[in-house]
Image: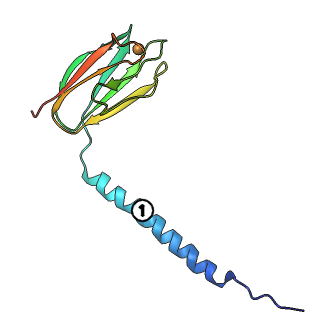
Amino acid sequence: MNHVPSRSTSRPLRAITIALASCAALAIPAIFAAAAPPAPTIDIGIAKFMYGPKDVTIAPGTKVVWTNHDETPHTVTSNDKSFASKGLDTDDQFEHTFASVGDFSYICTVHPFMTGVVHVRKP
Ligand SMILES: [Cu+2]
């Protein structure tokens, strides 16, 4: 009768290695998140086939959150393709943080007559 050598001797070491790697992966972002101030946020509603307000001016680093209040699906799609939502159903949200200055016009691809613009300016 043959005796098959056990291969289980390396398993505890592998488990510890995986555990250490997981801790490192979790700990590093937590340190950076604690140091960063919260991003300022503004809200833009989508209602009656309009973005409201449709024209906003914000500082770099501001997060914009769009919320669809219509029963009809809409999108938030920038003309320069720098951001694009999926189709937003009722109460769905889309957010984008604007890192650099510029003028970012956007439309709803379902209803291209719906337009908006975000002006990003240094305060
Ligand atoms: Cu639309």
Question: Is 37 left or right of 108, judged from the image as shown?
Answer: left
What's the colour scheme?
Answer: rainbow
Q: Residue at x 90, y 92 (%)?
A: 1
Depth order, front residue of 19/116: 116
Q: Residue at x 43, y 18 (%)?
A: 74
The answer to whether residue 105 is above or below residue 122 is: above
Quadrant where the image shows the C terminus: top left
The 10 Å Cα crowd at callout 1, few under 14, some 14 to 19, many 20 or more, is: few
**Residue 8's x, y, as percent?**
69, 81
Which quadrant holds residue 121? top left
Q: Residue at x 16, y 31 (%)?
A: 102
Depth order, front residue of 34/113: 113
**Residue 6's x, y, as percent?**
73, 85
Q: Quadrant of ligand 1?
A: top left
Question: Is 72 left or right of 61, judged from the image as shown?
Answer: right
Instruction: Identify the residue at the far right of this view.
Output: 1
Which quadrant holds residue 61? top left
Amino acid at pointer 1: Ala
- Residue placed under numbered mark 1 in the picture: 25
Depth order, front residue of 1/112: 112
Q: Secondary structure at mark 1?
A: helix
**Residue 42's x, y, as percent?**
27, 27
Instruction: Identify the residue at the far left of this view.
Output: 123
